[in-house]
Image: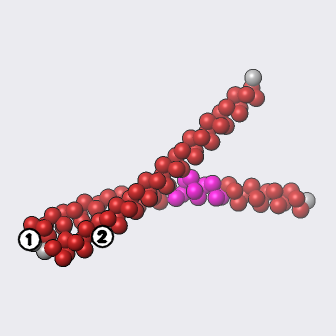
């Protein structure tokens, strides 16, 4: 009974981890990217305005903030891409395993 319980708990932990990594985190990353995309557009407009008015200090500060936003956008895209690759590979592996069993 102990081994069966341990196996069940390990499977449950693995399933929860899989869901978090391949479904929950990518969905959060997508919603985060929407907000960050808007923020990036606003920052670009503010940078352009500050360059136009000659406020170099604020423009430089905004440029640093824009770089941070773009880094986070890249991380979010990587999270979504990795999850899609994992899910795709798992679906293909499952399909092939079922196909082999059915003859």
**Residue name at image x 89 percent, y 62 percent:** 2
> At which x and y percent is residue 8?
79, 57
Q: Main secondary structure of the magenta part?
A: helix
Relative placement, left or right, of 35 versus 55 is: right
Q: Is residue 103 above or below residue 41?
A: above
- The answer to which quarter of the image holds residue 44 is bottom left
Q: Is residue 34 above or below residue 86?
A: below
> At which x and y percent is residue 60?
22, 72
Check disc 2 and report the residue beneath it: 65
* The N terminus lies in quadrant: bottom right
Q: How many marks?
A: 2
Task: Identify the magenta region.
Answer: 16-25
Disc 2 residue crowd, few under 14, some 14–19, many 20+, Cα 10 Å? some
- The answer to which quarter of the image holds residue 69 is bottom left
Task: Mark yes or no: residue 31 visible.
Answer: no
Which color mode does the image show? secondary structure
- Extreme top residue here? 103
Task: For mark 1, give the secondary structure.
Answer: helix
- The answer to which quarter of the image holds residue 21 is bottom right
Q: Is residue 95 magenta?
A: no
Circle 1/circle 2 CB separation < 8 Å: no
- Extreme bottom residue here? 57
Disc 1 residue crowd, few under 14, some 14–19, many 20+, Cα 10 Å? few
- Lower position in the chain sequence, tag 1 or tag 2: 1
Relative placement, left or right, of 92 versus 43 is: right
Check disc 1 and report the residue beneath it: 53
Frontmost residue, 54 versus 13 = 54
């Amino acid at each position: 009974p102990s081994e069966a319980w341990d196996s069940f708990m390990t499977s449950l932990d693995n399933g929860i981890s899989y869901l978090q990594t391949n479904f929950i985190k990518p969905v959060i990353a997508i919603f985060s990217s929407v907000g960050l995309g808007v923020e990036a557009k606003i920052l670009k407009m503010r940078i352009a305005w500050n360059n136009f008015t000659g406020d170099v200090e604020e423009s430089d500060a905004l440029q640093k903030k824009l770089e941070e936003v773009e880094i986070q956008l890249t991380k979010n895209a990587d999270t979504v891409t990795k999850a899609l690759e994992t899910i795709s590979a798992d679906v293909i592996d499952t399909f092939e395993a079922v196909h082999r069993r059915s003859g």
